[in-house]
Image (cartoon, grey):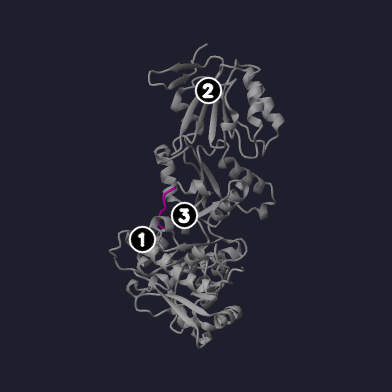
Amino acid sequence: MTAPKTGTLWGVGLGPGDPELMTVKAARVIGEADVIAYHSARHRRSIARSVAEPYLREGQLEEALVYPVTTETTDHPGGYEGAIADFYELSAKRLAEHLDAGRDVVLLCEGDPFFYGSYMYMHERLADRYTAQVIPGVTSVSAASAVLGRPLVQRDEVLTLLPGTLPAPELARRLADTEAAAVLKLGRTFGSVREALAESGKLDEAFYVERATWGAQRVEPFADVDPESVPYFSLAVVPSPAYAARTSGTAEATADAAGSQDPAGEVVVVGLGPAGPQWLTPEAEQALAAAEHLVGYGPYLAKVPQRAGQRRHASGNRVEAERAAEALDLAARGAKVAVVSSGDPGVFAMASAVLEQVEADGESEPGARRWAGVSVRVLPGLTAAQAAASKVGAPLGHDYCVLSLSDRLKPWEIIERRLDAAGAADLVVALYNPASRSRTTQLEAARDVLLRHRTPETPVVVARDVGGPEESVRVVRLGSFDTSEVDMRCLLIIGSTRTRVREQEDGTSVVWTPRTY
């Protein structure tokens, strides 16, 4: 016996509010559906239904899914989240009854169904049992950009979309890390969003857009908006900075176009230490606080507290040259720039990358130099080797060398030759970048090289995430330690023939290298 045919669930994006911005397909599916469902507050007025109304037809069944709670308190034993979860379960059952009866159901959704849309909660409860199709819609962010008459992003700019419900410090950090942004869900969050925009230095660039494309739309500079007048259907937009620079006529735009006659600024390369603020020097902290721009690898920038008016320029882990050039370009326009590094910036880090770019610039024609007059300072930081050594005692108490096992910037033959020389010289060896997902054989090869000059009982300190939440420090033996347990977050210290280990009563090991032979 053939099972009865079930209906199709449609998540239909209605766009930002103007019925004419709905897609042709959305209008057709709405008109053909057996059941029209929509969410509403207790007053039962549905914005989604009002947008779709021109396309409804007589005889269609309507399912008003009325939220039991919006912003008010609830006596539900599970609180707000419990009340909403129960509501979604009940709503899904109501729609499932229509689908089981063979009726096609359209669930109306302002904007796009999968962009902060209420439809997704029905989709995750029903799509595994019924055919479910989604019709995308124009988002409020696109609509806001259109009514502003400004591009959101262009070329290589990054756009970040954020809910205003995030804590203000988190909003500020993310706003500072991007070129362009949109912050949704204002209403009661307006105050914290304004605070975050000011803290990230983007308040003067931000616009407030309310009910974009509606007849009652409102567009103002964000800084001028009365917080008491802000509804939920509004957002903050920080549009393309490149477009603003070309069209605003500001001194910065003029300087960019004319080659900038402003006095050059400064690049300070700052070492953050291996972990938290407890290992940041006062000198480095002062430099970070004084900087107008912070440039660095994203996870390292995240360790620096957000400061009002400070701009952040985050990038990936393998673009050191581009990162250095960006910092020098900012300084050439008169800015105070801090480039952040983990550990010490002069140890396998950004100081060399910045100075390499300056040298390459100096080799160009004198009239073509981009960074003439830009000064570069390097501020030291506690190294990962020092931090790891302190956790076990003093394995670096005598002569030692520091090597990186990464062969991304130098051939393995050179690494192996230096390892062999360090072993023959009986130096303690601190190994940075010992292994990664793509480099799985180098550490085993390095161990074999050192075993030419060391006994298998030579102590090895395996330090992972020192100072961080996942810190672990172990003392193992060179001849038997498991190299597969080592990754890029580890640093190894391999003892000399003089390095000693003492087991303490609490079960931990003290490792030190005597100062005399």
Q: Earlier in the sequence, mark 3 or mark 2?
A: 3
Q: Spatial distance from mark 3 to mark 2, Cα to Cα?
A: 46 Å
- Furthest residue toward front: 1
What span is in magenta? Answer: 304-310
For mark 3, give the secondary structure.
Answer: loop
Residue 41 vertical position relative to residue 489 in the rendered view, above or below? below
Q: Main secondary structure of the magenta part?
A: loop
- Say the numbered circle drawn on residue 476: 2
Between 335 and 58, the one lying in front of the other is 58
Q: Earlier in the sequence, mark 2 or mark 1?
A: 1
Query: Of discs 3 and 2, which sits in the foreground?
Result: 2
- What residue sits right under mark 3 in the picture? 292
Q: Spatial distance from mark 2 to mark 1, Cα to Cα?
A: 50 Å
Q: Position of residue 353 (x, y in %)?
A: 60, 43
Q: Position of residue 66 (x, y in %)?
A: 38, 74
Q: Position of residue 239 (x, y in %)?
A: 52, 68
**Callout 2 amino acid:** Val
Query: Of discs 2 and 1, which sits in the foreground?
Result: 1
Query: Of discs 3 and 1, which sits in the foreground?
Result: 1
- What residue sits right under mark 1 in the picture? 82
- Furthest residue toward left: 75
For mark 2, give the secondary structure.
Answer: strand
**Callout 1 amino acid:** Gly
Mark 2 closeness class: few <14, some 14–19, many ≥20 residues within 10 Å: some
**Callout 3 amino acid:** Glu
